[in-house]
Image (cartoon, helix red, strand yellow):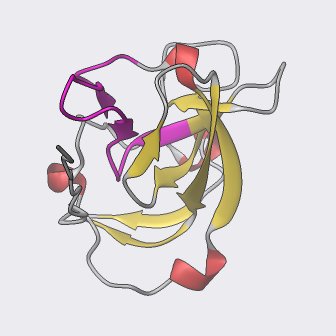
Amino acid sequence: MTTTTTVTADRRWLKSPHGTEMNETITLDVSKFTAGTHYVAATATMPYAYFKSGLPLGKITATGLYGPYNSGASDGTQILAGVLDTETAFNPAVTKVGGALRVHGSIDTAKLPVALTVPAAANRTDNLRFA
């Protein structure tokens, strides 16, 4: 028997496709994320986990990898770098996952997959417009 699972992109947070051509290729540090909050965990019928699109991300200074934005952190993730552009599937056994970082465009803050208080410009490296 074969089972097929389809993940449909949920990008309600994206107000327009403007800025897509400016996405940056990044690597996510899986150990920094929480199942159920930042990603959907693998199951017996869905062998891959996947990160939710729209996750606010910060760059971990020591490694250059990315983790969830955390305004109270001191590891670099307290600086908002952008948001994860697409749902990103991964094997739960891996520790690093490639992704696309959206750094430009218009974002509907209320529709992001996690709550976000948009930081002041000094605590951001993106060029996103949040509304």
The quadrant holding residue 33 is: top left
Left or right position of 96 against 92: right
Residue at horizontal 69 percent and vertical 41 percent from the top: 27
Q: Is residue 3 magenta?
A: no
The quadrant holding residue 105 is: bottom left
Q: How far across and down, in percent of the image, does residue 110 sit?
A: 15, 51
In this rendering, the answer to whether 31 lies above or below 70 is above
Q: How far across and down, in percent of the image, does residue 111 sit?
A: 16, 54
Residue at horizontal 33 percent and vertical 29 percent from the top: 38
In-front residue for pair 121/84: 84
- Say whether residue 123 is visible: yes
In-front residue for pair 129/35: 35
In this rendering, the answer to whether 33 lies above or below 115 is above
- Say whether residue 119 is visible: no
Magenta residues span 34-57
In this rendering, the answer to whether 71 lies above or below 126 is above
Residue at horizontal 38 percent and vertical 43 percent from the top: 55
Residue at horizontal 36 percent and vertical 16 percent from the top: 34
Left or right position of 8 against 93: left
In this rendering, the answer to whether 102 lies above or below 42 is below
Q: Is residue 38 magenta?
A: yes
Q: How far across and down, in percent of the image, does residue 61 sit?
A: 80, 25
In-front residue for pair 18/65: 65
Left or right position of 106 against 124: left
Q: How far across and down, in percent of the image, does residue 17 sit?
A: 38, 85
The quadrant holding residue 59 is: top right
- Where, quadrant-wise, is the C terminus in this rendering? bottom left
**Magenta portion: prevailing SS class:** loop
